Image (tube, rainbow, N blue to C red):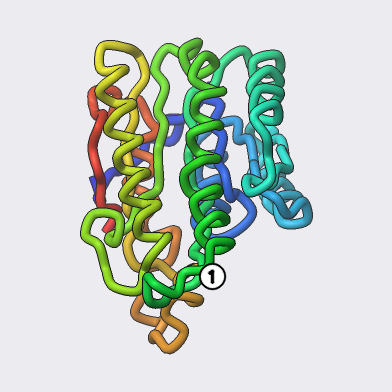
Amino acid sequence: MKEYQAKTDCLADKTILITGAGDGIGKTLALQCAQFGATVILLGKTVKKLEAVYDQIEEIGKQQASILPLDLNGATESHYDDLADTIKREYGKLDALVHNASQLGVLGPFAQIEKSTWDDVIQTNLTAQFMLTKALIPVLSLAKHASTLFTTSSVGNQGRAYWGAYSISKFATEGMMQTLADEFENSTLRFNAINPGATRTGMRANAFPAENTALLKMPADIMPAYLYLLSDDSINVTGQRINAQ
């Protein structure tokens, strides 16, 4: 899978929504999806960043992207319902949903986690993903095959001291993915989780400020696993936790 060679049209005619699409892995994935023929819906809270990604997709010269500004930390259930209605009206279906946006919070001893930090991390990393997935399942069901991809972490599979709310949110993310995969086992919907691994992103820099970034993979280096899980080559893969490195 890490050596997956995507065909030039492997995402043709697919509409893919990516959260956190304005930067880092989300931005790189959006550009890759557009390059391989997908219509990309860019979701994020910083319009300026989304517009920059939109412009780069325009330069690719294939399908036109769209921008959905939304702050996952403040969105209500009605926001997600409206979003689902808009996608259904404009595109008729949704072929893939990528939960890329995450919040690190503050690393430190468990007993010192502020409730405000806990609330922010759980809201972005878990509750928002629950509400967005719930709202979009009917639209995903309109596609011939649909892939939902959650983002996990090494600390979402093995707890690590001082990673507190972030680690716990990723354990819960994997549980949500497994629950959905089991519930929709005999359907056209598949649900998987991907662990990007150590990648040169802003979040990684916040977590490991003294790290030698030259040793890290770039977001573009881990794209094969993402493209595989979004393409029809993975239509029989569900309920899996995939390491991109």
Q: Relative to residue 73, is residue 237 drawn left or right?
A: left
Q: Look at the picture and state if 137 lies above or below 46.
A: above
Q: Who's the residue at 76% across and 50% down the image?
A: 51
Name the foreground residue: 10 vs 185. 185
Residue 112: percent from left, percent from top: 45, 74
Name the foreground residue: 192 vs 229. 192
Q: Relative to residue 162, is residue 15 drawn left or right?
A: right
Q: Who's the residue at 38% across and 30% down the image?
A: 231
Q: Residues within 10 Å of mark 1 (few under 14, many from 20)?
A: few
Residue 13: percent from left, percent from top: 53, 21
Name the foreground residue: 104 vs 44. 104
Residue 197: percent from left, percent from top: 32, 62
| Residue 31 visible at all | no
Residue type of the residue flagged with mark 1: Gly
Q: Who's the residue at 47% across and 44% down the image?
A: 126
The image quadrant of residue 69 is top right
Residue 171: percent from left, percent from top: 31, 50
Q: What residue is disc 1 on?
A: 202
| Residue 149 visible at all | yes
Q: Relative to residue 231, is residue 25 drawn left or right?
A: right
In this view, the residue farthest toward the bottom is 210
Q: Look at the picture and state if 25 lies above or below 66.
A: below
Name the foreground residue: 23 vs 176. 176
Q: Look at the picture and state if 150 lies above or below 136.
A: below
